[in-house]
Image: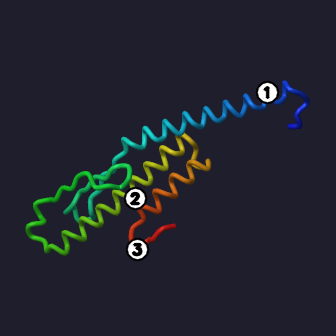
Amino acid sequence: MDRRLRGPEDAVARLEERRARFEQMAAATQDMAARMQTLTATASDGNGLATVTVDSGGGLVAAEFSARIQRTTPDAVSRALMEALAEAKRRIVEATQDVVAETVGADSDTGRAVTESLRDRLAAPEEGPR
């Protein structure tokens, strides 16, 4: 397609196209942000000792322990909590990726920036940032 300007009308039309794309991306970004604010993820450790819920930023909002922790060493309870927390954070990253794909697009600059930033912030210590 020939994108050379042929006159003032062409320039105005191109500006209108850009404005419409910008407004569409701004609305999609606002939708993404609103949906992400409501995200939570819940996960348990493999032994069912600890169950945690994290918010959209990976912050711990709830932790529950089974009665079995009374017969478990504190070290094992700590490991269970950390395992559940790591899994919940992994799930919040997945949920965020879904919202990004549905709103701004996973391949958009905004989508890539949001998911990479969250992945880097929530990477398990052994994984390290990407």
Check disc 2 and report its element: helix, strand or loop.
helix
Q: Earlier in the sequence, mark 1 or mark 2?
A: 1
Q: Amino acid at mark 2?
A: Arg
Tally of numbered discs: 3
State if disc 2 and disc 1 touch (CB < 8 Å). no
Q: Residue at x 84, y 24 (%)?
A: 9
Q: Residue at x 61, y 32 (%)?
A: 23
Q: Position of residue 8 (x, y in %)?
A: 86, 26
Assign a secondary structure to mark 1. Answer: helix
Task: Find disc 1 in the rendering and name its residue.
Answer: 12
Residue at coordinates 55% horizontally, 33% vertically from top-left? 27
Q: In the image as oriented, which residue stretches furthest toward the left?
A: 70
Residue receiving disc 2: 90
> Quick one: SS at disc 3?
loop
First in sequence: mark 3 vs mark 2: 2
Q: Mark 3 = which residue? A: 126
Q: Nearer the viewer, mark 1 or mark 2?
A: 1
